[in-house]
């Protein structure tokens, strides 16, 4: 039976472009009956398309807007999807400490399939080769920030959501966790290892995560 989690803290999804953060986040929020917040979406709602922000003002300007969007989003119980580069900001890294942060991982082949035809500013000149370089640059930060790691490759969104809920029930002092007769989470709880917290599977597929926003 999948534990039912009643969040008291925001659950934060991080990961590379094409990892499925937006669609997984929407489904997870629905399961938990909380708000879903896409920080890229909030930036675009207030300031226009990210691609146009990059073109007119540069990446540094966008990152400042992104930092503000993240700070506002993590003030309430919600599922929050961060843009791929949001964790590069030291202030954002500090703000994520102590929160249940989930790193959604994805294989290169699946990411290439999901990102085909997308308009991502940082991939404009390099495609999947640039994606690989960006992931290599960010991987250590993703790893440092994450409490739980879940591979989304070859998995359906509901499967991924179940893995996240089960993993956080073990790892996170999120709130009250109910399974069977009910368990109340307290303290830090046991850490979830990279192996026990990872969903296996690397087959490519066309899925609901193909249209996820995850711009940069």
Image (spheres, rainbow, N blue to C red):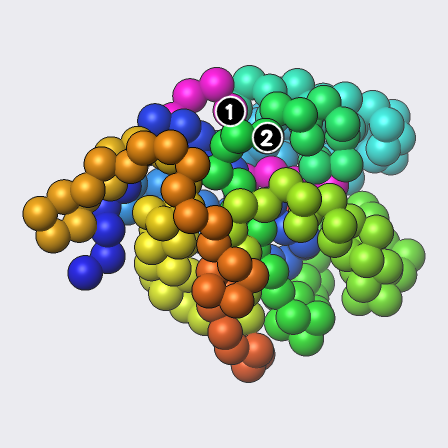
Residue beneath the point at 51% across and 77% down: 201
Say whether disc 2 or disc 1 marks the residue closer to the N-terminus: 1
- Dominant SS in magenta: loop
Q: Are marks 2 and 1 in contact (CB under 8 Å)?
A: yes
Residue of label 2: 96
Image quarter where the N terminus lies is bottom left
| Region rendered in magenta | 74-85
Q: Is residue 78 magenta?
A: yes
> Residue 33: which numbered mark, if any?
none
- In this rendering, the answer to whether 3 lies above or below 82 is below
Instruction: Classify residue 133 by image quadrant.
Output: bottom right
Residue of label 1: 74
- In this rendering, the answer to whether 197 lies above or below 10 is below
- Which x, y percent locates residue 62? 78, 28
- Which x, y percent locates residue 160? 42, 61
Count residues near mark 2 (Cα–Cα under 10 Å), then give few for <14, some for 14-19, many for 20+. Answer: many
Q: Is residue 191 visible?
A: yes
Secondary element at image label 1: loop
State left or right for residue 150 relative to residue 15.
left
């Amino acid at each position: 039976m999948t534990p039912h989690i009643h969040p008291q803290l925001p659950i934060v999804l991080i990961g590379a472009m094409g990892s499925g953060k937006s669609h997984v986040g929407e489904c997870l929020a629905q399961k938990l009956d909380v708000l879903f917040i896409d920080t890229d979406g909030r930036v675009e709602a207030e300031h226009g398309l990210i691609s146009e922000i990059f073109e007119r003002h540069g990446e540094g300007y966008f990152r400042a807007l992104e930092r503000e969007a993240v700070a506002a989003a993590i003030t309430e119980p919600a599922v929050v999807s961060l843009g791929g580069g949001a964790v590069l900001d030291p202030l954002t890294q500090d703000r994520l400490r102590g929160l249940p942060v989930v790193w959604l991982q994805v294989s290169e082949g699946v990411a290439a399939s999901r990102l085909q035809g997308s308009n991502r500013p940082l991939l404009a000149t390099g495609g999947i080769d640039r994606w690989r370089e960006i992931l290599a640059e960010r991987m250590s930060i993703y790893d440092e920030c994450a409490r739980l790691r879940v591979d989304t490759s070859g998995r359906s969104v509901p499967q991924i959501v179940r893995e996240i809920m089960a993993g956080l029930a073990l790892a996170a002092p999120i709130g009250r966790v109910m399974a069977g007769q009910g368990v109340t989470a307290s303290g830090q709880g046991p850490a979830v290892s990279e192996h026990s917290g990872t969903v296996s599977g690397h087959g490519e597929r066309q899925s609901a995560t193909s249209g996820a926003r995850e711009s940069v």
